[in-house]
Image (cartoon, grey):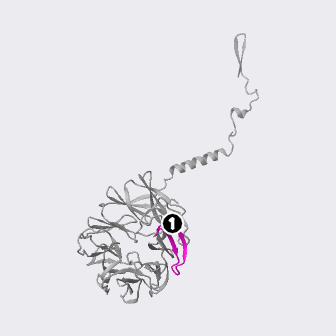
């Protein structure tokens, strides 16, 4: 169309399509969009729809179980995957896998610690006087009462044999010093299998036997006579006189297959290594300022105020030395070095015990006790002025802890088991979480 004015009048002239505009401009016969545009839009729509409909990843900590406990009620985790807790004398066993209650059993009186051994839960009530409260054994599988007898029931490293002893308290604690007879206990009936008499007192510990043979019992008597006994029969296998020393809960120790003893001499303090089978002296070397000897993988670590020194157990030769460290500890198969002697705070990191190299830095973190075993270690860290607690997991060879989540406010006194974390809350609850690594 076009409009022109002639003499004041408007005349409309229809020009049709003769102005040269193609027919397809008026009504296109082919898409004006590029060929790739529609598939791209469709792909974007599908991607957005998938993202919107996908479920969010599960939380790193997921709730398994909550139960009410008193502030002083003991609990522990077993290597078999159970949680044992005592509330006002009543003991409950829960599966850490799904939180299922497995059994409940009563107790004559509350205990201050729950111990297991030989497929049993060993209950020894706290006694305010000097009277012997005895030990009661109940089945770890069913909670059924099995037997009760006087004295304490202990086990030694590397063996499931139950030993009935009378402990001796000293300035260094109740430790491994015993007095009177040592009885080996039948775990089914609670009767005595064999007995070794201790005329006065002695330090009790387990030592390795020859290659392929079971652990043996070592008694270091007050007269410094060391005696090795067979745990199956109680028979005396070897005996020897040991040097004068401060025998106690951490002296001597077994490391690298040898018995290591710190002791004074006229030439100063020494560390001597003895064959645990024959009790023959293998080597002696100066102890320096070391106040302890701790297993370090295949090595032995001397710990003291001047640092940590790793030596070859077979020869006593020094392998490495770290002046800034004060102690080491083995947790879930990993050796952890600390900047303090207590071995609980100020961890340096997970180390390679063969070289002393730090594999995983742990500054600011604190390891969580893991009586339930496993090959990974949980660690916690206070942040934001101690108002928030983070929890992370460390595995063999990890360069750094893998952050899992924040713990709810008011939780503490935690223990760990494979893929499980158990903590108390200030509200009087024991909470079990399953943890999932993000990797």
Q: Residue 354 versus residue 375: which sits nearer the camera? A: 354
What residue occupies the far top of the structure in this picture?
7
Q: Residue 352 versus residue 177: which sits nearer the camera? A: 177
Q: Residue at x 33, y 80 (%)?
A: 163
Residue at the spot of label 1: 350
Q: Residue at x 51, y 59 (%)?
A: 438
- Judge the density around disc 1: few (<14), some (14-19), many (≥20) Cα neighbours within 10 Å: many
Total marks shown come to 1
Q: Is residue 306 magenta?
A: yes
Q: Which residues are magenta?
A: 305-329
Q: Quarter of the image holding residue 70?
A: bottom left
Residue 222: percent from the left, percent from the top?
A: 34, 83
Residue 97: percent from the left, percent from the top?
A: 40, 66
Left or right, 347 with reference to 155: right
Residue 380: percent from the left, percent from the top?
A: 44, 59
Q: Secondary structure at mark 1?
A: strand
Q: Residue 128 versus residue 341: which sits nearer the camera? A: 341
Q: Residue 157 versus residue 295: which sits nearer the camera? A: 295
From this viewpoint, is residue 394 visible?
A: no
Q: Is residue 435 magenta?
A: no
Eyeballing the image, is 321 above or below 12?
Answer: below
Residue 366: percent from the left, percent from the top?
A: 44, 61
Q: Residue at x 44, y 73 (%)?
A: 292
């Amino acid at each position: 169309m076009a409009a022109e004015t002639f003499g004041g009048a408007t005349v409309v002239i229809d020009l049709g399509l003769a102005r040269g505009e193609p027919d397809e401009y008026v009504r296109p016969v082919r898409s004006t969009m590029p060929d790739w545009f529609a598939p791209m839009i469709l792909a974007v729509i599908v991607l957005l729809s998938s993202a919107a409909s996908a479920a969010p990843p599960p939380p790193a900590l997921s709730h398994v179980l909550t139960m009410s406990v008193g502030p002083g009620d003991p609990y522990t985790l077993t290597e078999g995957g159970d949680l044992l807790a005592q509330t006002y004398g009543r003991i409950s066993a829960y599966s850490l896998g799904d939180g299922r209650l497995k059994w409940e059993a009563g107790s004559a009186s509350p205990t201050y610690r729950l111990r297991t051994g030989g497929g049993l839960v060993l209950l020894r009530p706290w006694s305010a006087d000097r009277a012997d409260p005895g030990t009661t054994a109940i089945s770890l599988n069913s909670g059924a009462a099995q037997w009760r007898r006087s004295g304490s029931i202990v086990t030694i490293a590397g063996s499931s044999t139950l030993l009935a002893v009378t402990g001796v308290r000293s300035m260094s604690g109740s430790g491994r010093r015993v007095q009177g007879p040592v009885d080996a206990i039948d775990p089914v009936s609670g009767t005595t299998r064999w007995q070794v008499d201790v005329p006065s007192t002695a330090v009790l510990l387990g030592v390795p036997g020859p290659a392929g043979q079971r652990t043996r019992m070592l008694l270091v008597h007050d007269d410094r006579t060391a005696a090795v006994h067979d745990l199956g029969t109680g028979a005396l296998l070897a005996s020897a006189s040991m040097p004068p020393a401060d025998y106690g809960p951490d002296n001597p120790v077994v490391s690298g297959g040898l018995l290591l003893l710190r002791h004074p001499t006229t030439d100063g303090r020494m560390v001597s290594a003895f064959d645990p089978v024959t009790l023959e002296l293998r080597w002696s070397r100066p102890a320096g300022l070391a106040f302890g000897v701790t297993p370090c993988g295949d090595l032995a670590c001397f710990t003291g105020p001047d640092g940590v020194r790793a030596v070859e157990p077979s020869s006593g030769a020094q392998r490495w030395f770290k002046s800034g460290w004060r102690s080491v500890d083995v947790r879930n198969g990993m050796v952890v070095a600390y900047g303090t002697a207590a071995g609980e705070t100020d961890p340096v990191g997970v180390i390679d015990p063969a070289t002393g190299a730090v594999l995983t830095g742990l500054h600011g973190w604190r390891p969580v006790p893991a009586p339930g075993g496993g090959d990974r270690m949980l660690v916690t860290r206070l942040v934001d002025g101690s108002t928030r607690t983070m929890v992370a997991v460390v595995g063999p060879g990890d360069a750094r802890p893998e952050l899992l989540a924040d713990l709810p406010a008011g939780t503490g006194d935690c223990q760990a088991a494979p893929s499980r974390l158990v903590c108390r809350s200030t509200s009087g609850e024991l909470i079990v979480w399953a943890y999932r690594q993000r990797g």
